[in-house]
Amino acid sequence: MFRSFCIVLVLLLFSACVKDKPVAITPDPAPQSQLKKVYVINEGGFGYGNSSISLFDPGTNSVVEDLFKTQNNANLGDVTQSLNYVNGTFYAVVNNSGRIMVCDAQFKKTGQINGLLSPRYFLPITNQKAYVSDFKANAISVIDLGSNTKTKSINCSGWTEGMVLIYNKVFVCNLRRNYVYVINTLNDQINDSVLVGPNASGLVIDKRDKIWVLSSGDAVNSVGARLTRIDPLTNIIEKSFDFSVGESPDHICLNKTKDSLFYLNKGICLMGIGDAALPSATFIPGNARNYYGLGINPNDYSIYASDALDYSQKSNIYIFDMKGNQKQVFKAGINANGFYFE
Amino acid sequence: MAYGFGFFVQATLYALLFKGQLCYAQNTSSLQAVEVITKKYSLSQIGKKTEEIDSTTKDKFKYGSLSDLLSLNSGIFIKNYGPGSLSSTSFRGGNASQTAILWNGFNLQNAMLGQTDLALISSVLFESVQLEYGGSSSLWGSGAVAGTIHLNNKSTFGQGYFSTTNLGAGSFGLMNASTQFQISKQKFISSTKLYTSSSKNNFLYRDTLDKVQSLKHQRNANYDLSGLMQEFKFLINSKQILAINAWLNSNHRTLPNNEQALGGKSYQEDQALRLSANWTYLQSHYKSVVRAGLFKDVINYTDSLSGIFSKSRSQTLMLENENYFSWFKNQQVNIGISGNSSTANSNNYSSTKSLSKVSILAGNKFSFFNEKLISYVSARLEYFSVGSLPLTGNTSLEYKVCKGLSVSANVAKVYRQPTLNELYWLPGGNLNLKAEQGYTYEANAAYQWQKKSIAFSASTAAYSRLISNWILWVPGENANPTPLNLQQVWSRGLESHWKLAYKKEKWQMRVGLMSNYVLSTIQKSNLENDNTLNKQVIYTPRYNFNGNASLAFKNLELAYFHQYMGYRFTSSDNTAWLSPYQYSSLRFNDKVIQKKYLVVLFAACNNLFNSNYTVMAGRPMPLRNFEIGLTIQTKK
């Protein structure tokens, strides 16, 4: 009895039903078409250091995973928030690493902007100057694009987020205040503010040069979300549309002709800039999907929406045509939150 | 009041259930009958794999946290974010919310989070640390899905005066001290434990991504833990004991960032006040326990740069009555009723929120063939303020095949109700959440053999658990994190535990080996185009081994602990993972025993082979480091 029991135990001790070592899958080199590419910004998990950029080719439907690592054999950093392309140079804003990775058109690293606390978005002002919003700095950082260094800060208490530039003015969202702040880019000073409601993170400029700000509301204090139209010449609110309490719209963007607003709110919503009211139904219902990022491809009017699933696996990127019909789905990195369209 | 309530419950339930069939002895018994009447945890352990960490092993880890103790001495995978940082459990493929951590029978899980940070629990506080593998929801309620950790204070009347002081120091500014003073009279016990532990925690690690300067110091990781535990125990008369316990715990720590993240300035304060009272009434074949507990937790998280000043307050009040009764030839019935009310407030709640529950438990232990065959059956019905749960239950069997060999099996229905954060967090909280629930099955075999100076034991366990309505936080309708019942997870595995001890004259040798094989895969998911089906749950190693060997001569002892941890997936589609690691610790102690005092000198080398490893992604762990300690015990 004892012997047979021990034999069974030894077998159990060394039994291995599943091979432990995972198999790393190395994708084949992706074929490239002449069509303009789509860069998917993948935040990765907060604190995991696994953010990345995926390169999607709409011509071949191929995806290059983690473009930065492929080109540089290094990690991009912790939580990449946004990506811009200015004068042949990419600027990848890596939020939780407190830096901006500067890369050439092939995504080879050429530099790095340090000295930032928690950078969020990058806005080129001139060929020499850019603004960077920041979660923690209580300021907008001014960057010299020639030397890739931070030259000064524009004090702006709170969590600065999305920015747009028009008429030598930068309108900055602030998630810790109920205002959009207005910076004069000629002297880098805040000279006005506009009350838009809590948690405004995104804003766009339509074809009539009007600014649309989307505030997501404050669920804790039962303050509803609001869409506000501002005249950037006068900094005066021209219109505002209130959402029901409990709704928390986000990720506002425009189509190529800048006459239709898109945002996420239980799916993808569409509203013409001349509409008298908020849409009563979603343009593309969310159903079981939980959209986390949204972008409109200006090259073909297609709508890109990311589903981050459970925050810890590769995201699904859904592509819809301008009528809202799903065209395609592909996989990008973890927590895809936005897109940069060539 | 409590006395009357206990008798009311006893009288009512027994009258209803047994209609006078009870046959307990009429003559007055003394409190020695404790051994006759089963405790709840020994009922719940029937048919299951259980382990008690022996006092010799526990002594070697008394300078550390519960996380340090369990990591090397149990089959539980401890998700350790670094020394002093968050440590939570993964028990048989479950998550931290699916492990019940019980202090003298009360669940320590934070009502808001549904989990407990083991780094905040000093291992020196408990006389007994027991691990109960497998689900026991019918006995311990919500959360006891994958396993239960029992932390118990044990004291005996009439032992005189006793005091012990531990002083320790270690690498990276580690300092710790604890003291216990106990007065144990014939009818009264007072036990006071004070402890403190702090560290700069600026340990060295290797950053493999930094090709230029890989050797780095950890930043922003200092911690300062202190607390007090007080126990009073009164022998009221030969049938009644009253125990009152208080535990005050306070921890302040700065929170280190991920390796690739910019250094942060955030810190967290955790404060806990836990009060409990336990009244036991005993007769020779009957025992009743009325218990009450009040737990308060405060968590203050501050990140001044981010403008986050989060304050969370929660309070849980527990009332419980358990009754055990021996009837007809070693049959024992237990009946209990419990009420629990939690309230909490946070910056992310719209107002103070509460969650209450009432449960009724009934069970019976059957013994046959001179206790060769033991069975335990129990059922629990629970109502809570945001919904009721179906009947849960447990059936266990244990059979002694022959001398030294026993086999056992257990089937149980288990559940975990949503936490306050899952229900009320704004934005994202989901009031429509259902409880996670499912069935767990296990079979065990254990063999013990002893001859003269050799003792050998071996045990093995196989288990399977299928949990539906598994709760996951996902981007909700408005891209805000929202918990949803999304998955079905099947966990199954094999475990073995070997022990060998040899003693000859002044020499003693002990060897132990533990193996754990866990497959915990996602069987169903409600997410569209989800690539997690049949994939291993993240941070659940499929293989891990713990081994230890010790050699003692007279009062000198050298002990070696070794751990192998297999691959851990960091993405739920299993496309990213952490490599296996091996960790080892060498511990030495020397005892100087005198009639009235005992002095123990202690030294340890942790991470003996200086391996560069991480338990969690981006969270570095220290390279080789050292500890020394001194214990002085006096007895009168």
Image: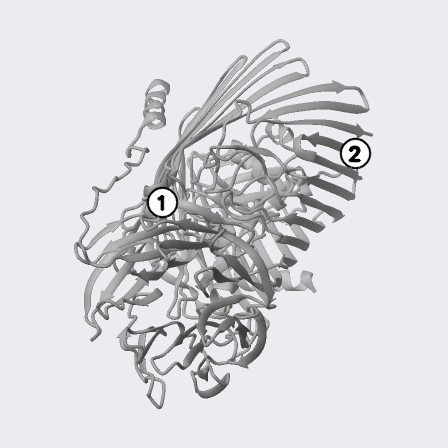
Q: How far apart are marks 1 and 2 (CA)?
A: 66 Å
Q: In the image, is residue A328 above or below residue B542? A: below
Whole-percent x and y of residue B596? 82, 24
Is residue B363 visible in the rendered image? The answer is: no
Quickly name the residue at label 2: B163
Whole-percent x and y of residue A45? 43, 52
Q: Quadrant of residue B52?
A: top right
Task: Assess disc 2: are there few (<14), some (14-19) or many (≥20) residues with their C-alpha within 10 Å of its C-alpha.
Answer: some
Q: In the image, is residue B435 above or below residue A1? A: below
Q: Quadrant of residue A205?
A: bottom left
Residue that extends furthest to the top in the rendered view of this protein: B505
Image quarter of the N terminus of chain A:
top left
Image quarter of the C terminus of chain A:
bottom left
Q: Nearer the viewer, residue B4 or B521?
A: B521
Whole-percent x and y of residue A15? 31, 28
- Answer left or right for B547 relative to B200: left
Residue that extends furthest to the bottom in the rendered view of this protein: A276
Identify the chain of the residue marked 2, using the numbered disc in the image: B
Instruction: Identify the secondary structure beneath mark 2.
Output: strand
The numbered dot on residue A108 is: 1
Task: Assess disc 1: are there few (<14), some (14-19) or many (≥20) residues with their C-alpha within 10 Å of its C-alpha.
Answer: some
Q: Nearer the viewer, residue A202 or A102?
A: A102
Instruction: Identify the secondary structure beneath mark 1.
Output: loop
Whole-percent x and y of residue A237? 48, 86
Q: Residue at x 42, y 35 (%)?
A: B369
Identify the chain of the residue marked 1, using the numbered disc in the image: A
| Colouring mode (rainbow / by chain / secondary structure / one colour) | one colour
Is residue B383 visible in the rendered image? The answer is: yes
> For the residue marked with disc 1, what is the amino acid?
Lys
Q: Which residue is drawn at 63% across and 28% down?
A: B60
> For the residue marked with disc 2, what is the amino acid?
Ser
Tell me the mark number nearer the camera, choosing from 1 and 2: 1
